[in-house]
Amino acid sequence: MTSWQITRVFAGIVILATLALGAPASPLFMSSGWFWVTAFVGANLLQSGLTQWCPMEIFLRKLGVRGGA
């Protein structure tokens, strides 16, 4: 997988996980604070889509993951 694919998969997992953790059906971890993480990831996706610059991809490339085509 390329760095951009890993970034988007990771973002999707974080969004789904934080939505589940903040939902009323999650009595163990229910907190509206999780939605701030969801908003942060969404804002970063928007920013990277507009500017084509993503800090997560830079981090992954430093770890040796190959860049996107």
Image (cartoon, rainbow, N blue to C red):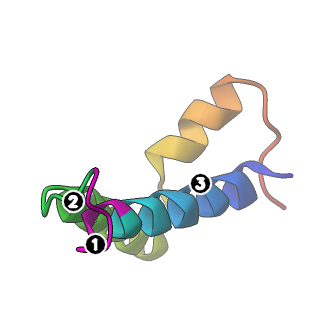
Looking at this view, name the residue that lies furthest to the front: 27
The residue where tag 1 is placed is 23
31 shown above or below 66 = below
Numbered range of the magenta stretch:
21-28
The residue where tag 3 is placed is 10
Instruction: Kindly identify the residue that appears in the image at 68 percent across and 57 percent down.
Output: 4
Between residues 53 and 33, which one lies in front from this camera angle?
Answer: 33
Task: Examine the rendering and report whether any part of residue 48 can be seen.
Answer: no
Q: Nearer the viewer, mark 3 or mark 2?
A: 2
Horizontal and vertical percent for residue 31? 15, 58
Horizontal and vertical percent for residue 56? 51, 43
Q: How far apart are the two marked residues, 3 and 1, measured between alpha carbons?
A: 20 Å
Horizontal and vertical percent for residue 65? 79, 35
Reply yes or no: does residue 48 show up in magenta. no
Labels 2 and 1: the sequence-earlier one = 1
Q: Give the amino acid at mark 1.
A: Ala
